[in-house]
Image: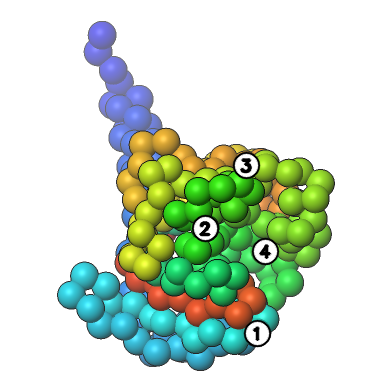
Amino acid sequence: MNCSPVFKTIIFLQVMCSAFAQKAIPINIQKEVKGKNTYVINRDIEFINEPSHRGIRLDARYGDGIVWLKNMAFRNGSIEFDVRGKDIKQHSFVGIAFHGEDTLTYEAIYLRPFNFKAETEPFKSRAIQYIARPDYRWQVLREEFSGKYEKPINPPPDPNAWIKVRVVVQGNTISAYINDNKDPSLVVESLGALKSGSIGFFVADTSGGDFANLVITKTD
């Protein structure tokens, strides 16, 4: 079948738009911090310069902490990053916030490294957590939807090592993959009030954390 020049042009533009929409965007987080393109909530930052990880470290203190990226609206796509917490019980909560509006309204997925190697329940099933503030903090979700918004990670990672996380958002479905595992460790339906917003590195109460190698892919 011979296609008209106009039809070929339309197909070409559709392919180009699709490729552009799905382009991966590496973020040099140190450059963003130095350029004052971040908004830091309740944490101090220092730089990490390791052979495979040039990123940032957030200090530990009471209250949640977020490093928001300015001018980076995100709706659907994937957020990939490396994160490192610590094997300290109840004092290491590290992850990513997205669809953020301010310090009180956002969704987040975070890890509890101190539960990675747990052999007994319920701690074994509390390795990765989804929240949607302000209404759906972990306490509410655990009480009202037990076992739905927090899951184990198999195989369990080293709680003191760098961990690769990929969060995929497509409409109301949010999935989280750990260390290039084929299957997601967590799949949930979004409870967030917003469907688009900012992205930020997230640490929960009393926790610090290390972050590097951020790549954002938007699909719309």
Location of mark 3 (residue) = 188
Q: x, y (%) of residue 111?
A: 52, 60
78 shown above or below 5: below
Please count the marks in the image. 4
Distance Cα–Cα, label 4 vs label 3: 15 Å
Residue at 66% across / 52% down in the picture?
A: 195
Q: Amino acid at mark 2?
A: Asn
Pointer 2 or 3: first along the chain: 2
68 shown above or below 156: below
Location of mark 1 (residue) = 62
Residue 69 or residue 108, whichever sits in front = 108
Pointer 2 or 4: first along the chain: 4
Residues marked 4 and 1 touching at CB (< 8 Å): no
Location of mark 2 (residue) = 115
Q: x, y (%) of residue 149?
A: 65, 47
| Mark 4 or 3: the one toward you | 3
| Mark 2 or 4: the one toward you | 2
Q: Amino acid at mark 1?
A: Tyr
Distance Cα–Cα, label 2 vs label 3: 20 Å
| Mark 2 or 3: the one toward you | 2
Q: Amino acid at mark 4?
A: Tyr
Pointer 4 or 1: first along the chain: 1
Location of mark 4 (residue) = 106
Distance Cα–Cα, label 2 vs label 4: 24 Å
Pointer 4 or 3: first along the chain: 4
SS for dot 1: loop
Pointer 1 or 2: first along the chain: 1
Q: x, y (%) of residue 67?
A: 53, 78
Residue 172 or residue 8, whichever sits in front = 172
Is residue 55 visible in the rendered image? The answer is: yes
